[in-house]
Image (cartoon, rainbow, N blue to C red):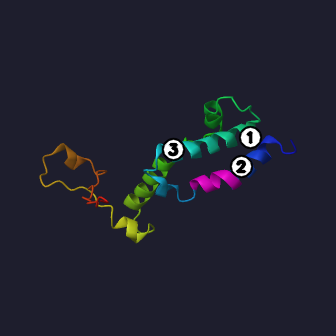
Amino acid sequence: MFLDQAACQDAVRAIITSRLDYANSLLYGITSKDSNRLQRLQNRAAKLIFKAKKYDHATPLLRELHWLPIPSRIHFKLLTIVYKCFMDSTTSPSYITELIQPYIPSRSGLRSAQDTRLLIVPHTRTLSSR
């Protein structure tokens, strides 16, 4: 191969991982089939960096690269967005910040009154396609 490991890792991050991370919070709730397809892509990228064989396990390679699996990446991205909106609403997008409301209990003696990290889960109604 013409690339050393560091250059290959930079190329993979620029071409593949940037695409996996771009708007991946929109991928929340995708089917396991689609999630598995993206995971296979990430596994192949890790194997490419380490010049591993096709049937080698990718999990140790992902750990060494400090890459989360695809479902965890999506979950982490969502949690990061919520955390940023909750902690610093001045720099966060207003259309997201308006959806995040802290939970304030109606009675002060509840144990949940002491936890300031709780949020209100909005009630949503979906229409079934018939």
Q: Are marks 2 and 3 in contact (CB under 8 Å)?
A: no
Q: Is residue 112 left or right of residue 3?
A: left
> Would residue 65 be counted in the magenta stretch?
no
Mark 2 residue type: Val
Q: What segment carries the magenta color? A: 15-21
> Label 2: which residue?
12
User: Residue 102, position in %: x, y?
Assistant: 28, 58
> Label 1: which residue?
48
Within 10 Å of the Cα at label 3, are there few (<14), some (14-19), or many (20+) other Cα atoms? few
Q: Is residue 117 left or right of residue 14?
A: left
Q: Are marks 1 and 2 in contact (CB under 8 Å)?
A: yes
Which SS type dominates the magenta stretch?
helix
Q: Residue at x 79, y 47 (%)?
A: 7
Within 10 Å of the Cα at label 2, are there few (<14), some (14-19), or many (20+) other Cα atoms? some
Mark with earlier residue (2, 3) = 2
Mark 1 residue type: Leu
Mark with earlier residue (1, 2) = 2
> Would residue 17 be counted in the magenta stretch?
yes
Question: Alpha-carbon distance for marks 1 and 2?
Answer: 8 Å
Front residue of 119 and 122: 122
User: Residue 56, position in %: x, y?
Assistant: 68, 28
Front residue of 45 and 55: 55
